[in-house]
Image (cartoon, helix red, strand yellow):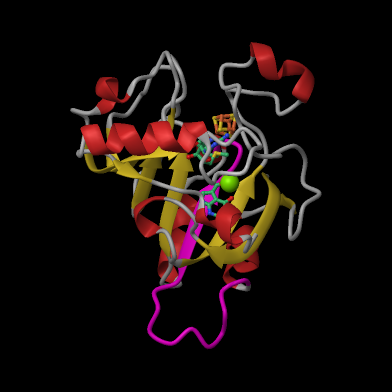
Amino acid sequence: MYHVKEAFYTLQGEGAQAGRASVFCRFSGCNLWSGREIDRASAKCSFCDTDFIGTDGINGGRFNTPHELADHLKALWPVHAGRATPYVVFTGGEPLLQLDTPLIELLHSDGFEVAVERNGTVIPPPGIDWLCVSPKGTNPLVVTRGDELKLVFPQSVAPPDQFANLDFNHFFLQPMDQGIAHKNHATVQATVAYCMANPQWRLSLQTHKIAGFE
Ligand SMILES: C[S@@+](CC[C@H](N)C(=O)[O-])C[C@H]1O[C@@H](n2cnc3c(N)ncnc32)[C@H](O)[C@@H]1O
Ligand SMILES: Nc1nc2[nH]cc(C(=O)O)c2c(=O)[nH]1
Ligand code: SF4
Ligand SMILES: [Mg+2]
């Protein structure tokens, strides 16, 4: 049984694939936070910007089999998509608590590329086409390779230096959203300054929030 908070068609807003049309599947639940505000301060990840409790979001629900969920996600990709490769992004919550090989294989057999946004503390199944890892505080990474490392910045206990030599093709810093408009905000300025002083790192802005397309 899969628990999905919400699923929707949009553009990837962040990182190296920003701007790409994507079906998002947001799984319910996370291993680093209950999702309840009352637990936030004591959670292993305390700056989360997402509601991932329950299955009550748009196109959310419980799915008994990988076939059911794959069909549900496939139906969100536009029929007249031309030459674009269909793309699904699994996020959450922590998607690797639920994503498994049968679901990945079904999506592959229908031509989808499969991407994952993960916190790095859960071992992924094989076959994922695009792995984004976003380390959280001192929670140990169980896998230190992937396509992109996207660190929310700043985290005092997780400075970028700690990750700069890991086996990734892209290194991004994403300003921590604290519910304040991005423009001219001190966190964005600090992130820009860090990337300018350490050009291995690139700026990732959450474009869906800035442009308001979601
Ligand atoms: C909500 S998380 C879900 C996936 C997974 N649990 C993870 O943490 O990577 C999706 C992305 O949003 C980022 N994120 C979460 N809270 C944020 C915040 N307050 N500001 C900026 N990015 C944030 C995460 O680091 C991650 O890259
Ligand atoms: N448009 C859009 N892009 C995203 N990239 C990563 C997201 C996430 O919450 O994992 C996200 C999201 O929530 N919306
Ligand atoms: S690990 Fe990801 S989903 Fe879990 S609380 Fe942190 S940002 Fe949110
Ligand atoms: Mg998000």
Q: Is residue 195 above or below residue 45?
A: below
Q: Is residue 14 above or below residue 158?
A: below
Can residue 100 be seen in the rendering of this structure? Answer: yes
Q: Tell whether 12 sits left or right of 129.
A: right
Pinpoint residue 66: horizontal percent, then vertical percent: 58, 55
Quadrant of the frame with the C terminus = bottom right
Count of numbered tags: 0
Res 19 → quadrant: bottom left
Please give the name of the residue rendered at 57% of the width and 65% of the height, measured from the top-left corner: 10
Can residue 175 be seen in the rendering of this structure? Answer: no
Residue interval drawn in magenta:
76-94
Is-magenta flag for residue 112? no
Q: Tell whether 190 sits left or right of 181.
A: left
Residue farthest along the right direction in this orientation? 56
Give the camera-side residue of 189 and 103. 189
Residue farthest along the front direction in this orientation? 184
Quadrant of the frame with the N terminus = top right
Res 172 → quadrant: top left
Please give the name of the residue rendered at 74% of the width and 60% of the height, measured from the top-left corner: 59
Pinpoint residue 136: horizontal percent, then vertical percent: 46, 24
Dominant secondary structure of the residues highlighted in magenta in the image: loop
